[in-house]
Amino acid sequence: MYKYDAIDRQLITERVEQFRDQVSRWQSGELTSDEFRPLRLQNGLYVQRHAPMLRIAVPYGMMNTAQLRKLAFVARTYDKGYGHFSTRHNMQFNWPKIEDCPDILGHLADVEMHAIQTSGNCLRNITTDQFAGVAADEVIDPRPLAEILRQWTTFHPEFAFLPRKFKIAISGTKEDRAVTWFHDIGLHLQQQDGETGFRVIVGGGLGRTPIRGQIVRPFLPWQHILTYCEAILRVYNRFGRRDNAYKARIKILVQALGVDAFTQLVETEWAQIKDGPATLTQAEYDRIAAHFTAPAYDRQVDASAFANQIENDKAFARWVERNTHPHQVAGYVAVTLSLKQHGAAPGDISADQMDLVADLADQYSFGELRVSHEQNVILADVRKSDLHAVWQAAKGAGLATPNIGLLTAIICCPGGDFCDLANAKSIPIANAIQARFDNLDYLFDIGEIDLNISGCMNACGHHHVGHIGVLGVDKNEAEFYQVTLGGRQGYDARLGKVIGPSFAAEEMPDVVEKIISVYLENRHPDERFLDTFDRIGIDPFKNRVYEGRAHGKAKTAQKEAA
Amino acid sequence: MMAQLIKDNTLAADTWQTLELGPDETPENVALPSGDVIFPAAVWLARKTEIISGNKRIGLLLKGDDRLEDIGGDLDHFIVIAIDFPKFVDGRGYSTASLLRQRYRYAGELRAVGDVLHDQLFFLKRVGFDAYALKGDKNAVQAIAKGFSTFSDAYQTSTDQPQPRFRRRA
Ligand code: HEM
Ligand code: SF4
């Protein structure tokens, strides 16, 4: 994992001092609230429904155990003993005091963590694949280039006040686990004629106008990534709309100009800076990549006991089936610790759980861990012979729900319980669905399915790319939920289709159950939900869900509620 | 309140006046003052020859929507170019400044005007500004003491440091 050098460390220390000074100038009235707002946002500090919220970056999802323990310390000391992992490799604390934030950031800086650019209209935290560097299907490890991009984005002087937020995701596998098609810039690392480079995708995004990104350059040799990003950002900074926040993302500019004209502008700009000093060198790549070398793997893992354990312990076998991921090194797997325990807020993790995960990582996974955009924690390098011990410890802490990839591993934003922008609550919907599908045999029988929930059209819960997507909507001040089907992430990422009029909260478990029943009745052997959906289309689902609702029970329910 | 001009790390007297168009004035009909005048780009474009013959020292004001490409050939005429920040969160001026310095090789005074505050100074300096019209009601002493030295180094290439940090490593 990347370790800071003296300058990296100095910069984040200076950032803490800068922020401390900004807070004190705001308290003294020298900075108005309007002037302070963008400054605190660029430090991840929101003011939410009940309290401020502080968002801390976990750059490209990698963390060491000292960092996780520090987060546990912050959760206990300055918050209510827990934190929330978001879909963007961030940890959010829901209850800090503004005046404590400089101290919190000071503690974080001690372990090379920060909240820099985790919000605001600037270059945000870079995200990638949670299995980067260990995944069996990986073509190129994206982490060195993600770190290079992290440095480039940090305090970029020209791009600190963009028209709108800007998110870059990078992936190095064919399958793409980083939702790269739905980012402002999505980068696919690939090899062409023996050369390493990127497919550059621009103009994707979710939110109220979800758009799949478009390829601006099929292949860009890796050395040029900084100058090319600079060209894209400069075009966006100059020509992106600033009159309307809803039309300010780069996706709108790309749509307005058309991808060809947009590409032309970028290429013209790039021609002027290409091969300049910001062109990456092999020496720099090697220097950064040296931080991401493989740990001292045990090349002789004795997996015989493991085979027995699988044979004899069904619960363990289920967990292994769902919560482990193939590894490049024989005898190892990556373990996903589920933060989707039924009944808990998806993505939430208590300080005690953080400490336990840190202990597990120290003992079994070289002292490092990852967070995923599905809001789980990953131990990336676990010996098969250690799995049973990891499972038992995780189980004791509520971190071993064997549901990864299944219906109840719901991606869910904080919604109306915390978020000021919410139209509807999302956590209780997730919990009600989990309660309905609490039977593991049933859950396993249903098989792979992504259910994503957002509390409003900002789409923080990625509802558009859930196989089943649930979106909170506000109708006459009452909370309703719109359902989409067929969305997906991955290389073939696409948006779900709206099934029809929205539903009241208490209807949601029934609605999901009906959708599932259509699948179970129609599936061919070996078909996942998505396969059946693609084969039979949306109508059978629609018919079942709205059966017997002359013009929609939702409407009546809505009137009653209103 | 009058803006406070910061130059060379100190408060400086401002000898320049900026031509503002009244409600009935257009770039074509506005009276051209003499002395050290900063002309809006539209006035410059409409009245170039007149301005050149009437004013020895010419300044230019670039607003957000003005196209740098339109005045790129005229830069030798200007002693000052002022770039307007209508709101401090409107960051177009950073790209304009970068282009003026790095692409067009403009070497005169580059002045940030408008909603210019303490916490922009570091970035403004990096992209190539060398004069800053800090808003009148802000603490200039504090801004000068801390605003330019917020960070001791930077990763990226920029006007004030054309070499990225990775090329400056020992
Ligand atoms: C609680 C405070 C939060 C606020 C105020 C907030 C606000 C927003 C807004 C306004 C957008 C739409 C941006 C646009 O389309 O221009 C957005 C998008 C997004 N946010 Fe949040 N969000 C919050 C929390 C979260 C959390 C907890 C997550 C992760 C669970 C998250 C992840 C995302 C993602 C993935 C997107 C959509 C991707 C895209 O930008 O296109 N946000 N958020
Ligand atoms: S989707 Fe809406 S409700 Fe959920 S966190 Fe984002 S802004 Fe808040």
Image (spheres, coloured by chain):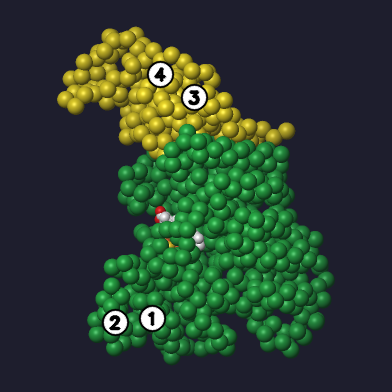
Mark 4 residue type = Val
Which residue carries the number 1 mark?
A507
Question: Which residue is at a point 40% across and 59% down the rendered structure image?
Answer: A421
Residue A213 in sight here: no
Horizontal relation, residue B167 to residue A34: left or right: right
Q: Verify CB contact (< 8 Å) between mark 2 and mark 3.
A: no
Q: Give the residue displayed 28% in from the left and 85% down from the top.
A: A549
Chain A drawing hue: green
The single residue placed furthest to the front in the displayed view is A28
Q: Residue A98: horizontal and vertical position, in percent?
A: 54, 48
Q: Is residue A349 above or below residue B45?
A: below
Query: The disc numbered 4 marks a residue on which chain?
Result: B
Residue type of the residue flagged with mark 1: Glu
Badge 3 sits on which subunit? B
Q: Which residue is disc 4 drawn over?
A: B80
Q: CA distance from mark 2 to mark 3?
A: 64 Å
Residue A469: x, y in percent? Answer: 42, 72
Asked if badges 3 and 1 are on one and the same chain, I answer no
Closer to us: mark 2 or mark 4? 2
**Screen quadrant of the C terminus of chain A:** bottom left
Q: Are marks 2 and 4 in contact (CB under 8 Å)?
A: no
Q: Is residue A111 above or below residue B154?
A: below
Q: Is residue A185 above or below residue A25?
A: below
Mark nearer the viewer, 2 or 3: 3
Q: Secondary structure at mark 1?
A: helix
Give the amino acid type for the residue marked by disc 2 in the picture. Lys
| Residue at x 51% of width, y 53% of height | A52
In the image, which lettered chain appears yellow? B
What is the distance, in whole Å, between disc 3 and disc 1 at their CAs?
Answer: 60 Å
